[in-house]
Amino acid sequence: MIRKILVAASMTALISACTSAPAIQTGDDAEVIGDNLHRVDNSRAKVAYVDPDADFTRYRRVLVLPLGVDKIEIVQPDKSGSAVNRRDWELTEADKLALQEMFQSAMEKQLQERGQFPLASEPGDDVLEIEAMITGIAPAAAKDDNMSRTAGRSYVITEGAGTIAVAVAFGDSETGEVLALFKDARSSSSHWGMNNSVTNRADVQRVFNSWAKQVNSSLVKVTGKGE
């Protein structure tokens, strides 16, 4: 159910602090999706929706589902000066598994080890389900392998690894009802430096860590754990 609404909506977000306080749209003019999700103005994420009647204080644990990596749109990097045999940027099964492992590690570290939300292994009446999926990536350079980069080029310098977009749904783990959605996109870094498989992995991990911190701080607020 969560994935069905997430894909259909294509846009999402959980309440997070911004320059102005977040505010849930209400009234006849409110933007509503899925019957119960109202648009959140002034969210830190790109787009956000939340159920204004949801009681988040009942949730004390979280169930993090595997990161969705099967419907990723890849915006190909500039191919100027490319070699004849240079191929498009593609995600292998190993790449997808690595992304899932990095995301899970970030969520576990920020929610359980540094936060206040133990991870659950199965649904429960006090368990909030989190389901995320990567919706798109825009690499800053060709993939770091022999088939993609120009032969003889020893290094590549870029402004970070590129941009990654994610959509996340929060729902009741027992009923499957979606309570909040968010969609966001971030550049991995604003600093110029080496672009290779090692630096790219580190950049992606930093982005996942940042999102996980945002999720933890938002959940602390809406569950009342920060009081």
Image (cartoon, rainbow, N blue to C red):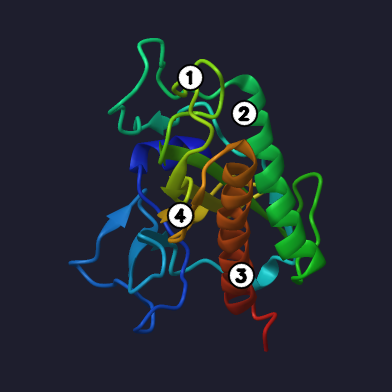
Q: Nearer the viewer, mark 2 or mark 1?
A: 1
Q: Which residue is mark 1?
A: 151
Q: Would residue 214 be found to the left or right of residue 118 on screen?
A: left
Q: Residues under labels 3 and 4: Cα distance?
A: 13 Å
35 above or below 99?
Answer: below
Q: Residue at x 76, y 60 (%)?
A: 109
Task: Characterize the local packing of mark 2: few (<14), some (14-19) or many (20 or more) Cα atoms within 10 angstroms.
Answer: few
Q: Which residue is mark 2?
A: 95
Q: Which residue is mark 4?
A: 181
Q: Residue at x 41, y 10 (%)?
A: 85
Q: Nearer the viewer, mark 3 or mark 2?
A: 2
Q: Residues under labels 4 and 1: Cα distance?
A: 44 Å
Question: What is the three-letter code of the residue carrying label 1?
Answer: Ala
Q: Give the quarter of the image for residue 58.
A: bottom right
32 above or below 225?
Answer: above
If you read the primary sequence from the N terminus, does the residue marked by circle 3 or circle 4 appear first? 4
Question: What is the three-letter code of the residue carrying label 3?
Answer: Leu
If you read the primary sequence from the N terminus, does the residue marked by circle 4 or circle 2 appear first? 2
- Report the front residue among 163 and 8: 163
Give the image location of residue 27, x and y in percent. Answer: 24, 72
Give the image location of residue 125, x and y in percent. Answer: 74, 56
User: Mark 4 near mark 1, Cβ–Cβ under 8 Å?
Assistant: no
Q: Which residue is mark 3?
A: 219
- Element under label 1? loop
If you read the primary sequence from the N terminus, does the residue marked by circle 3 or circle 1 appear first? 1
59 above or below 131?
Answer: below
Task: Characterize the local packing of mark 3: few (<14), some (14-19) or many (20 or more) Cα atoms within 10 angstroms.
Answer: many
Residue at the farthest left position: 29
